[in-house]
Image (cartoon, rainbow, N blue to C red):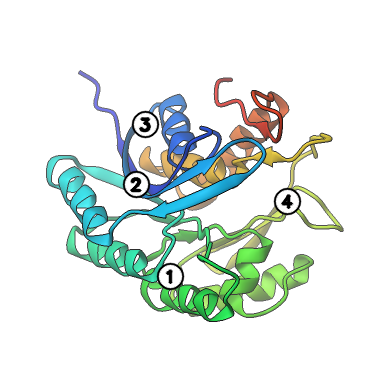
Amino acid sequence: MKSIPVALTIAGSDSSGGAGIQSDIKTFHELGVFPCSVITCLTAQNSTEVREILSVNENFVEKQISAVTDDMNVVSVKIGMLYNTAIIGVVAHCINRYSLRNIVIDPVMVSTSNDSLIAHDLVMAYREKLLPLADLVTPNLYEASMLSGRAVINIEDMREAALEITGYGARNVLIKGGHLEEEKAADLLYNEGVFEKLTAKVVESEKEFHGTGCMYSAAITAYIAYGNDILTSVKKAKDFVTLSIKKAYSPGKGSMFLNHRH
């Protein structure tokens, strides 16, 4: 039988099915990669709102990772919502302990309140524990601002932020510019010391699109699992996401959900 590459997603569960673990699994499957998953938190959400988030105990997060890696040859890993510093520490520990490779980090940073100290602790945990292990980090503009410590509102800011983030140990950085005012749908990749701007035609909609960041990083992880380099994987993933946005639909009363089936 033809072998299928195994990819692992470590992220939160989205009860609406539009983002998080559910979106990652659908993306892996559509791109022909076998999906394994480790759930870090549960969310009660739908297309209009997030009602509540319940964290998974960090020890159980480690047991999930151990169970998968003891049995399967995981060739690439997508890391999404980790929710708190304890889980960040456990995931970093497991990356080293189980020699996980091809690490793509989508730094979804959500705190339990608006307490700036909690936000600060999360950022510091990412900088100190996870960024040095990342082959690619894929923040949006807000997350890039948090990780770099500078406001990111234009392409030049994205360049400076990418350099700051690699200064914490990340090998490559993709800053997603979906909310750029000057040039929408323009992403900036800093790959092996070279900047490359990636653009796509904007898909207009009266509603927000749900789960674009999750799908983007998961698609990159899937293409890496097949042996593609970072640049090729990012370009292929951007094409995949753009087509998924064009075919988006609205199963609920709120946001548009991306169409994984092309």
**Residue 6, percent across and down?**
29, 37
Q: In which quarter of the image is residue 249?
A: top right
Of callouts 4 and 3, the N-terminal one:
3
10 Å crowding of disc 4: few (<14), some (14-19), many (20+)? some
Between the C-alphas of marks 4 and 2, the distance is 27 Å
Q: Name the residue under label 1.
A: 131
Of callouts 2 and 1, the N-terminal one:
2
Q: Mark 3 points at which residue?
A: 33
Q: Looking at the image, which is closer to me, 64 or 200?
A: 64
Between the C-alphas of marks 1 and 4, the distance is 22 Å
Q: Which mark is residue 39?
A: 2
Q: Is residue 109 above or below residue 65?
A: below
Q: Mark 4 points at which residue?
A: 178
10 Å crowding of disc 2: few (<14), some (14-19), many (20+)? many
Specify whether residue 187 is in view. Answer: yes
Between the C-alphas of marks 1 and 3, the distance is 25 Å
Q: Do the residues labelled 2 and 1 touch (CB within 8 Å)?
A: no
**Residue 160, percent across and down?**
67, 76
10 Å crowding of disc 1: few (<14), some (14-19), many (20+)? many
Identity, as a three-letter code, of the amino acid under mark 4: Gly
Q: In this view, does 16 lie above or below 89?
A: above
Q: In this view, does 65 lie above or below 153?
A: above
* Side of 86 relative to 20 (left or right): left
Specify whether residue 80 is in view. Answer: no
Which one is closest to the eye, mark 4 or mark 3?
4
Identity, as a three-letter code, of the amino acid under mark 1: Leu
Which corner quadrant holds the C terminus?
top right
Q: Are marks 1 and 3 in contact (CB under 8 Å)?
A: no
Which one is closest to the eye, mark 4 or mark 2?
2
